[in-house]
Image (tube, rainbow, N blue to C red):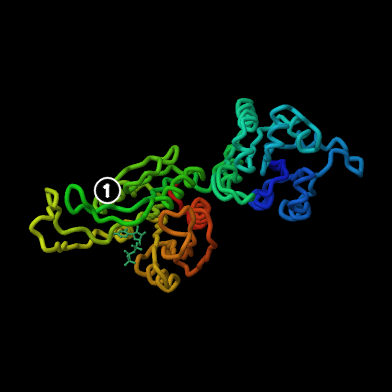
Amino acid sequence: MTCIVFGVSGGIAAYKAVEVVRRLAERGFDVRVVMTEHATRLVGPDTFRAVSGNPVSLRLFDAQGKDMEHISLARMADVVVVAPATANILAKMAHGLADDLLSTTLLATRAPVLVAPAMNREMYRHPATQENLRKLRERGVNVVGPESGPLACGEEGEGRMAEPPVVVEAVLRLLGMRGDLSGHRVLVTAGGTREPLDPVRFIGNRSSGKMGYALAETAKELGAEVILVSGPTQLQPPPGVERVMVETAEEMRREVLSRCGGCTVVAMAAAVADFTPSRRSGEKIKRAGREGLTVELVPTPDILGELRERKSPGQVLVGFAAETGDLLPRARKKMEDKGVDVLVANDVSRPGSGFDSDYNQAVILFRDGREMELDLMPKRELALRIWEAVAGLLGDRAVK
Ligand code: CTP
């Protein structure tokens, strides 16, 4: 059985490590948790014992005389993970210090090592921490995260431990195993479309593209090959993702339909305009001599509808619904109308979520009637929850 020695050092993110250990144990790994003393103040060892199904190791010199445990743990490990990895444990690793069970095990092991740093952003940015991380990377240590977002200290910034599914994915990759979306080709649309009135004006919407970009980025991290069809946005393309820029609903339709064939998942996070001007003026519409201006709008093609028509067996379609009030009833209705497998609905009129925010609060509806109401969370985290839901549907029927 593959053995994962899982070090937990004393960061607030230790609570997230519980989730990582639970997921790894569920996959059938023999997970041996080693906690530093500070970590035990944040999460009780009994919690890790319960989720890993194994005793938790705490001290270098055990009262029962098992005092060569660092050597046995170091040898039995197929991989050693440290999550959260505080600035302190990273410094110890970089300098070869060994003054407790975890640091000693790390020095004694020859197994590959993965660390998930988590700390206050100033500590993360400090040249000492950066240098330690550089040294560790050079030495072959794998680093996952940290991410940006709200930190336990109340500040915002880089230093959040990578989310549990991302850490699990990194562990699997290190062990040469496939992750939840690996082998899948995923198409994500993002941002709002622009429908031109004349060469300088357009009808657009408030979509920032952040949700779609978070989906594309996390799908890549979960092992998928990702195509991102994006409306105009300032956002940078996520690393490793093939990005296709479009402007109008019609262009988005063309790019999506020509690429959706080989995809196991299509997630339509874009805010596609529902209407477009019936005529586009070749020249700038002049103000002079006009009492007013009436623009006739005609419906745009329903991309999701066309995707449903040509859906291949096993393909999962994810739709989004941006509503203003009455969320659940409207989402249920849209679920029926759109015939998607998963619908992610959010109320964009709620303060602190929706357009342009880094946060979102959504409800995920499944075709079989299941509904998941989620809390307000960073869009990246919501993206990971969506992929988890989608991976559950892909199962073995995926076109891998
Ligand atoms: N969508 C699409 N093609 C369109 C318009 C929307 O594929 N021309 C997709 C969106 O990307 C989203 C879903 O349909 O995944 C729902 O979009 P939304 O605008 O909320 O729904 P509509 O059906 O347009 O309903 P309404 O705007 O009336 O609420």
Q: Ligand 1 near label 1 (Cβ, under 8 Å)?
A: no
Q: Where's residue 86, x and y in %?
A: 68, 40
Q: Where's residue 215, x and y in %?
A: 45, 50
Quadrant for ligand 1 reads bottom left
Three-letter code, disc 1: Glu
Q: Residue at x 78, y 54 (%)?
A: 46
- Density class for disc 1 (Cα within 10 Å; few <14, some 14-19, many ≥20) is some
Q: Is residue 312 visible?
A: no
Q: Residue at x 63, y 51 (%)?
A: 23
Q: Is residue 38 above or below residue 143?
A: below
For the N terminus, give its image quadrant.
top right
Q: Where's residue 45, x and y in %?
A: 78, 51
Mark 1 = which residue?
Answer: 247
Q: Nearer the viewer, residue 124 or 112?
A: 124
Q: Nearer the viewer, residue 131 or 379?
A: 131
Q: Secondary structure at mark 1?
A: loop
Residue furthest to the front: 288
Q: Residue at x 12, y 48 (%)?
A: 283
Q: Is residue 260 above or below residue 289?
A: above
Q: Is residue 234 left or right of residue 46?
A: left
The number of discs equals 1
Residue furthest to the left: 289
Q: Is residue 366 left or right of residue 194?
A: right
Q: Residue at x 64, y 49 (%)?
A: 153
Q: Is residue 367 visible?
A: yes
Residue 113: name its quadrant. Answer: top right
Q: Where's residue 263, x and y in %?
A: 38, 48
